[in-house]
Image (cartoon, rainbow, N blue to C red):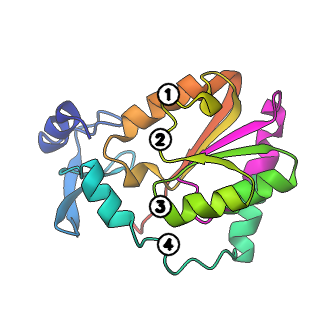
């Protein structure tokens, strides 16, 4: 989260929808969490730096099962089906692909799969699956601007220090007329 967004959150305004009803929601890993009453965004007022993020996610996927519950499988199948209208180059970019469920479905449907992930073990896994993967796509010629039909961020925005910046950056990789999809978990009200 940028300093301006942090100041906005602390002043009680949501940096996502600018509504004035951000309230303290709890704490996780020594970080204060705030939640917007209107858009339900959950905000963290102390953003981890890259070193802190690497440490936090170093063992995040240690218990990876690489299997999907039927309801999750059906949901991911629907995401890929809905993106079909955007297919032109056949290139799909997924930020924070984790265990790779979405890219697995997209690959089975003929998409060329690209992924961004910070977990070393998941980067290795993605490479073994034949996906083009990186921990940072900026400046990587394999991730050329404006060349992806689809950019997805499924349950990712709540994990990044500056979600607004990530959403804005996604537009740079998306081709004109492409599709960008972001989903977040919906904690109990």
Identify the element where label 1 is drawn: loop
Q: Is residue 182 inside the magenta stretch? A: no
The mark found on residue 136 in the picture is 2
Q: Which residue was labeled with disc 1?
A: 139
The answer, for residue 134, to whether it is visible in the render is: yes
Placement of the N terminus among the 4 image quadrants: top left
The answer to the question of whether label 2 and label 1 lie on touching residues, with beta carbons closer than 8 A, is yes
Residue under pointer 3 = 119
Determine the CA span between mark 3 and mark 2: 11 Å
Position of residue 114 measured from the top left corner of the image (x, y, whole percent): 67, 44
Q: Earlier in the sequence, mark 2 or mark 4?
A: 4
Q: Nearer the viewer, mark 2 or mark 4?
A: 2
Dot 3 or dot 4, earlier in sequence: 4
> How many C-alpha atoms fall within 10 Å of the one at disc 3: few (<14), some, or many (≥20)?
many
Contact (CB < 8 A) between labels 1 and 4? no
Where, quadrant-wise, is the C terminus in this rendering? bottom left
In this view of the protein, which residue sits in the foreground, 70 or 90? 90
13 or 81, which is in the foreground? 81
């Amino acid at each position: 989260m940028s300093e301006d967004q942090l100041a906005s959150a602390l002043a009680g305004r949501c940096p996502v929808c600018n509504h004035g009803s951000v309230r303290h929601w709890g704490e996780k890993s020594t970080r204060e969490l705030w939640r917007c009453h209107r858009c339900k965004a959950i905000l963290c007022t102390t953003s981890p730096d890259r070193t802190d993020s690497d440490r936090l996610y170093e063992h995040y996927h240690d218990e990876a099962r690489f299997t999907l519950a039927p309801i999750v499988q059906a949901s991911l199948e629907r995401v890929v089906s809905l993106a079909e209208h955007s297919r032109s180059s056949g290139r799909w970019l997924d930020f924070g692909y984790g265990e790779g469920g979405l890219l697995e479905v997209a690959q089975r449907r003929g998409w060329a799969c690209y992924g961004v992930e910070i977990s070393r073990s998941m980067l290795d896994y993605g490479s073994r699956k034949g996906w083009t993967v990186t921990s940072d796509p900026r400046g990587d010629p394999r991730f050329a601007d404006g060349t992806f039909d689809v950019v997805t961020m499924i349950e990712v925005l709540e994990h990044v220090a500056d979600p607004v910046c990530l959403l804005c950056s996604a537009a740079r990789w998306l081709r004109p007329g492409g599709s960008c999809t972001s989903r977040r978990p919906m904690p109990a009200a």
